[in-house]
Amino acid sequence: MDHVSAKKRSDIMRQVRSRGSKPELIVRRLLHAMGYRYRLHTSRLPGKPDITFASRRKAILVHGCFWHSHAGCKKAGLPKTRSDFWQLKLETNKARDRRNIETLNGLGWGVLVVWQCELRDLDRTRNTLSVFLEN
Ligand SMILES: [Zn+2]
């Protein structure tokens, strides 16, 4: 990751950060093709979950592996420069994710986290989504 210049990396990260990032779009497209209707970034719920299904009380969070520190994933891990900064930032993100999921669960919402790296296998993702939404 460190062969990328700091400027370039911050551009990349801004893109990844923005709403409607590519992994989320992939999941939305899958859900749409499967016939599901959903709402996006519902501000009334903790953490503004990416995709929500109010009548089912279910929420899907699409997590970038780097930003959300996907455990054991190749795409996750600390950059070698400014690692203290990144460690704090990523741990804060992770704590926030955990808190949001717990709060949603407490409100009776089911939560599915879809990781960016899982989207390499769309058949499997489709299956995971369907099992989550229908059970
Ligand atoms: Zn991952």
Image (cartoon, rainbow, N blue to C red):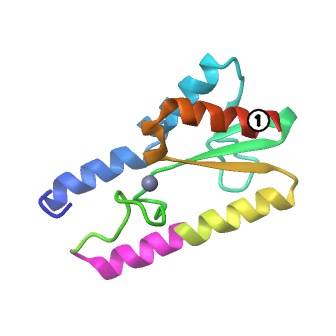
Q: Which residue is mark 1?
A: 133
* 84 part of magenta stretch: yes
Q: Is residue 34 above or below residue 94?
A: above
Q: Is residue 71 above or below residue 41?
A: below
Q: Nearer the viewer, residue 26 or 128?
A: 128
* Whole-percent x, y for residue 30 in the image: 57, 25
* 106 part of magenta stretch: no
Q: Is mark 1 within 8 Å of ligand 1?
A: no
Ligand 1, seen in the image, is in the quarter at: bottom left
Q: Nearer the viewer, residue 126 or 111?
A: 126
Secondary structure under tag 1 reads: helix
Query: Left or right: 124 with respect to 34?
Result: left
Q: Residue at x 76, y 35 (%)?
A: 133
Residue farthest to the bottom, as pictured: 84
For the N terminus, give its image quadrant. Answer: bottom left
Residue 4 figure quarter: bottom left
Q: Which residues are magenta?
A: 81-93
Which amino acid, by three-letter code, is at mark 1?
Leu
Q: Is residue 12 above or below residue 97?
A: above
Query: Left or right: 122 with respect to 8?
Result: right
Could you tell me what secondary structure mostly forms the magenta stretch? helix
* Whole-percent x, y for residue 6 in the image: 17, 61
* Whole-percent x, y for residue 27 in the image: 55, 33
